[in-house]
Amino acid sequence: MIIAALAASACLSGSATADDWPAYGRDQQGTRFSPLRQITPNNVASLKPAWVFHTGDIARGTTNGIRSGFESTPLVIGGRLYLTTPYNRIVALDARTGKKLWSFDPKIDRTQPYGDGLINRGVAAYEVPHSMGACSLRVFEATLEARLIAVDGLTGRPCGGFGSGGSVDLRSVGNYRPGWYHMTSPPIVMDGVVIVGSAIDDNARADMPAGVVRGYDAITGKLIWKWDPLQVPKGVSPERWRTGAGNAWSIISGDPARHLIYVPTGSASPDYYGGLRAGDNKWANSVVALRPRTGALVWGFQLVHHDLWDYDTAAPPLITHLTLHGRKVPALFVGNKTGMIYVLDPGTGKPLIPIKERPVPPSAVPGEQASKTQPFPASSPLARQELRPEDAWGPNPEDRDACRRIIAEVTGTSLFSPPSLKGSLEVPGAFGGINWSGFAWDAVHERLIVASSNLPFKVQLIPAAKFKAGDRGNFRAAVAPQEGTPYAMARAPLLGPSGLPCSPPPWGELVAFEPASGRIAWRRRIGSMRDVFHGAIRGTEGSVILGGPIVTAGGLVFAGGTMDHRIHALSAETGEELWSADLPASAHAQPITYEVGGRQFVVISAGGSAKVDQEDLSDAVVAFALEGGKSRRAQH
């Protein structure tokens, strides 16, 4: 049994075997492309539920206001499926039947005010070279309580030689505070090192914990290196430099051929006022290439200078080969909440497709120094980046008139319009654009299949003294103090009186983007927002998407992520929706596909969102398959 499991996981550090899904993006490179092709456009309509597993872990926010969200993307290695629950339990299932094999409970404190709610996006796995004993196959999880845990992939028992009893404490960062500093995404293991970032709450204060990325020996748990994305710029007094974060909260990708990891970083703190963090704030809002053995910075590319909009580099970087000018070249794709795609050389970080610095609006807020320029790729954005009064939408004339007035009264209505005391629009909004849902690589057509959202937000800065006196701005919104700065903030989706968006649908879509030409091959609305925006009328399909797509050699795109309770399958060639199926709740997770016993499965976690109060919650892992399927694999 041990030999079989380890043989099946022989490619954990590089390319995956055809049957398995051994990394978050199927491979370390994050392509999300499976060579399986038993399920095709001709038979996908016959997919049926094969099994359902219920974790039992749901928090509905009824006692302490903390909700769970089920965002786990499982791994499949040697016939075993590994997933995490919102309570950070690791569960192993029989990948063919869904039967539980074991579970491990780190017993986290479920009462802490974790800024992202109770969520976890999955685990990483590592086969120890030349070992056949206990913990030869290690499963790693980074928890909400800031622990890095290693368990035996075959038994679920802690790996005793890793750290202290199988656990490493990750709380040794400046300004640590429970709840503010936590982990939501899986680590990555490369070259014998397990690397972990962190999730840090937005907008509580200026001097938040540092967004340090750290590498630990995958056998002993010993700290090998740490890398801080933010440094005090030359000429700036440390007393005048108050910030933190710039953290890697999303999924880190790896490049075994070049011995590099690609780290996507978020914004420096706080998001909407940067007067205490002068300069570009490198390497926040960037992708950086680090050596997994040493943490040495090889190169970095910043997607947003001096971020004032929460425009994190949230999408996991994707490494593949692209045909440019008649020849195949290595390419690294990076996207962020602006809705733009950047194509870089993975070895150097230099653009493969032109990127130009363009002037952007200045800030009128006292104390703020917005960047004069921002980098724009030559290709068109995949999300809306402007909303004019004449664009206002609504289900009735009253809504449209109210939305026109709101848009006309704010100080900016386009991408990189800086926040103001009067209020400005954030287009795209805080959901993106391209969020952690990211994109998948269609290797057959050389296309990125991108999950993109289109829901503008309104943002307003509130003077700190007024905020303390009870001023919460001029619209209903979520507020945060941004303590230590002169301004609190308020932000919310831009909605009309009826509660529906002021921007026209679709509010999200899948986009097939051809990076070599910059052409969009197809756009397709999937899902509906009717369950969230009650009273939404027909014709408003096209949901915000929080949960990314995958692509198969069988010619299909599978995606959940929509606010309705469905999973979708589209033709990779045309984007036509060919199949969808009901789920117990919305599926804010990435699906996976694998083959076991000659049968191809599609599996997704369907548990609803920790951040959307209108959503139903569940604890279901749902598997679909054809009846009596036979193996058909792509030949590469």
Image (cartoon, grey):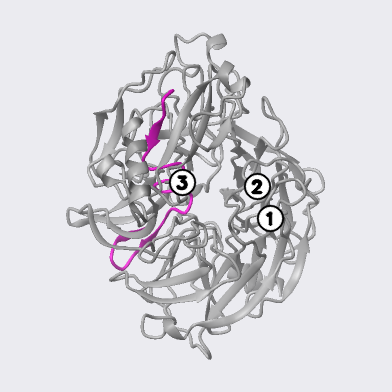
51 relative position to 48: left or right: right
Q: CA distance from mark 3 to mark 2?
A: 16 Å
Q: Of marks 1 and 2, which one's residue comes earlier in the chain?
A: 1
Q: Are marks 1 and 2 in contact (CB under 8 Å)?
A: yes
**Within 10 Å of the Cα at label 1, are there few (<14), some (14-19), or many (20+) other Cα atoms?**
many
**187 versus 422 height, above or below:** below
Q: Please, what is the three-letter code of the amino acid marked with disc 3?
A: Phe
Q: Position of residue 431 (x, y in %)?
A: 46, 46
Instruction: Examine the rendered structure and indicate whether residue 98 appears above or below residue 465.
Output: below
The mark that comes first in sequence, 3 or 2, is: 2
Residue 117: mark in rendering:
2
Q: Is residue 33 above or below residue 295?
A: below
**Residue wearing tag 3:** 431
Residue span colored magenta: 421-450
Mark 1 vs mark 2, foreground winner is: 2
Query: Which dot marks residue 86?
Result: 1
Which of the image's four quarters has the C terminus? bottom left
Give percent across and percent down for residue 245. Answer: 56, 30
The overriding secondary structure of the stretch rendered in magenta is: loop
